[in-house]
């Protein structure tokens, strides 16, 4: 019987990491950071399809295109951070640019698929939230040595530290 190479085995968590990092990078570099760098110019020309006011619309766009991608890339509140991104992409594609053909809007549609997939699947094993949760679980599972007033814990003995 042939042994299957472990590096050929499916790696869904690695795939989610690549989706998170790639999608977040593209959204931030193509849309978010240029808006942040040219804030005054963007404020003067941004479309306001929901009639929230240009400034609030731009702030919401920056939230969805800068802060949320940072959280998604790190794997913090990943599914929640996808919601503003998905709303922004849907508003952009359906309300701001309804006349675009599929070819003209392909970047937006691909981002929508990427962030919808992340929103459904979550951040995966390589997300910072999962790492923090695993660390907290490991710390919670370590039994605490009982102490009495005036005694030291067994793990403190012989450590060379000061005892009260």
Image (tube, rainbow, N blue to C red):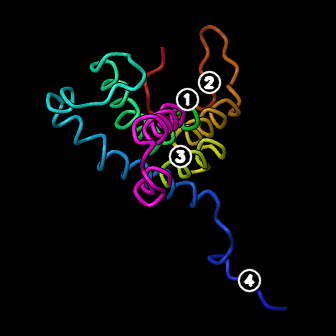
Element carrying mark 1: helix
- Residue 153: numbered disc: 2
- Residue 28: numbered disc: none
CB contact under 8 Å: marks 1 and 2: yes
CA–CA distance in space, label 1 to label 3: 49 Å
Element carrying mark 3: helix
Instruction: Find the magenta span and give its range.
Output: 81-109
Q: Is residue 95 magenta?
A: yes
User: Mark 4 or mark 1, which is nearer the start of the sequence?
Assistant: 4
CA–CA distance in space, label 4 to label 2: 49 Å
Where is mark 1, residue-wise?
156
Closest to the camera, between mark 1 and mark 3, is 3
- Residue 115: numbered disc: 3
Closest to the camera, between mark 1 and mark 4, is 4
Element carrying mark 2: loop
Horizontal relation, residue 90 to residue 33: left or right: right
Task: Farthest residue to the front: give it.
Answer: 99
Give the residue displayed 76% in from the left and 86% down from the top: 3
Where is mark 4, residue-wise?
4
């Amino acid at each position: 019987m042939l042994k299957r190479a472990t590096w050929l085995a499916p790696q869904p968590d690695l795939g989610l990491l690549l989706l998170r990092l790639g999608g977040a990078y593209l959204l931030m570099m193509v849309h978010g950071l240029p808006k942040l760098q040219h804030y005054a110019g963007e404020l003067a020309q941004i479309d306001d399809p929901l009639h929230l006011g240009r400034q609030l619309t731009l702030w919401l766009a920056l939230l969805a295109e800068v802060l949320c991608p940072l959280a998604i890339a790190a794997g913090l509140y990943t599914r929640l951070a996808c919601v503003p991104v998905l709303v922004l992409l849907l508003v952009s594609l359906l309300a701001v640019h309804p006349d675009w053909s599929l070819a003209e809007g392909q970047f937006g549609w691909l981002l929508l698929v990427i962030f919808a997939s992340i929103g459904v699947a979550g951040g995966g094993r390589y997300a910072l939230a999962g790492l923090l949760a695993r660390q907290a679980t490991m710390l919670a599972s370590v039994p605490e040595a009982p102490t009495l007033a005036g005694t030291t814990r067994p793990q403190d003995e012989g450590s060379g530290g000061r005892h009260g």
